[in-house]
């Protein structure tokens, strides 16, 4: 009995150590592949495709001609609805292929159920934002008092890269930042971040200098709302005592976005 209890305790300790150990940065994809010109080797880089399904796609293309919509790939037989959903953000039917691997610090997979509220204290918010940005398929809407780019290796800069990666795979990304009539340092930081985002084709607006927009909110895919005290700065995402909430609720997300559009 004692030996069995000892083995159970050892297993628990090992599990705890695994959970607490640092995890490597996750590989992610950005860009898209033209499925009408890509080789089987190139197609195999898509999520859940691999060599066999890639050859099926090429064979179908040879028999029936160019694809015009994602659903055409279902005729390959080995491509089902779930696989199609996984590759949809990374395929196109015209233009050059530019799919490539990027590195995003996605240290946790965020899984929620409708109606769930998750408390995010201090630096718990950052991996959630990275995860939601990497999973977004339709839209990311951000209104932020301060978005400070910081160093290239900092958390805020990595979030900027995640937003840019989302935009490049076809996600609509909109950002509004505070423009102050008294805080020149804040204005300088927000303008620097805005310039980086705009160069990547992201829509960025500023509020009126006569009004302080102290909102710190992001909405992903019209479903997930992140709202609280965190600004998007290295200090807020890594050092400060902050509290924010992740809320999985489409109705609330709609209400929040209505308000954000009202103040834009």
Image (cartoon, rainbow, N blue to C red):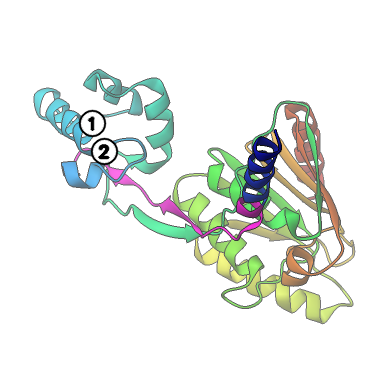
The answer to whether residue 209 is above or below residue 6 is below
Q: Is residue 227 left or right of residue 189?
A: right
- Looking at the image, residue 229 sits to the left or right of residue 165; the answer is right
Residue at x 10% of width, y 24% of height: 63
Q: Which residue is mark 2?
A: 50
Numbered mark located on residue 53 in the image: 1
Image point 62% across, 43% down: which residue?
A: 11
Q: Which image quarter: residue 222?
A: top right
Lateral position of residue 11 relative to residue 256, left or right = left
- The crowd level at tag 2 (other Cα within 10 Å; few <14, some 14-19, many 20+) is some
* Residue in view at x 32 percent, y 40 percent: 92
Residue that extends furthest to the bottom in the rendered view of this protein: 185
Nearer to us in this view, 82 or 218: 82
Please tell me which residue is depicted at 89% across the width and 62% down the height of the picture: 212
Q: Element at badge 1?
A: helix
- Front residue of 132/201: it is 132
Which residues, given as a range, are shown in magenta?
17-37
Q: How many marks?
A: 2
């Amino acid at each position: 009995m004692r030996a069995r209890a000892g083995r159970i305790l050892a297993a628990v300790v090992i599990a705890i150590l695994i959970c607490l150990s640092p995890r490597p940065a996750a590989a992610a994809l950005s860009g898209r592949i033209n499925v009408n010109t890509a080789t089987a080797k190139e197609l195999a880089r898509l999520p859940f495709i691999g060599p066999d399904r890639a050859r099926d796609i090429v064979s179908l293309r040879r028999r029936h001609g160019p694809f015009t919509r994602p659903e055409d790939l279902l005729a390959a037989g080995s491509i089902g609805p779930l696989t199609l959903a996984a590759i949809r953000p990374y395929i196109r039917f015209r233009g050059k292929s530019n799919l490539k691997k990027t590195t995003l610090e996605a240290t946790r997979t965020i899984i929620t159920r409708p109606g769930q509220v998750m408390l995010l204290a201090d630096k718990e918010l950052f991996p959630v934002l990275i995860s939601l940005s990497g999973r977004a398929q339709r839209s990311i809407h951000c209104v932020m008092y301060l978005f400070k780019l910081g160093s290239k290796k900092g958390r805020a800069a990595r979030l900027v890269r995640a937003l840019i990666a989302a935009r490049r795979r076809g996600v609509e990304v909109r950002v509004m930042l505070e423009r102050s009539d008294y805080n020149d340092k804040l204005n300088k930081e927000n303008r620097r971040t805005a310039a980086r985002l705009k160069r990547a084709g992201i829509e960025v607006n500023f509020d009126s200098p006569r009004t302080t927009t102290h909102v710190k909110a992001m909405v992903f895919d019209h479903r997930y709302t992140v709202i609280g005290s965190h600004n998007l700065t290295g200090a807020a995402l890594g050092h400060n005592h902050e509290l924010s909430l992740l809320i999985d609720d489409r109705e609330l997300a709609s209400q929040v976005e209505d308000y954000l559009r009202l103040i834009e």
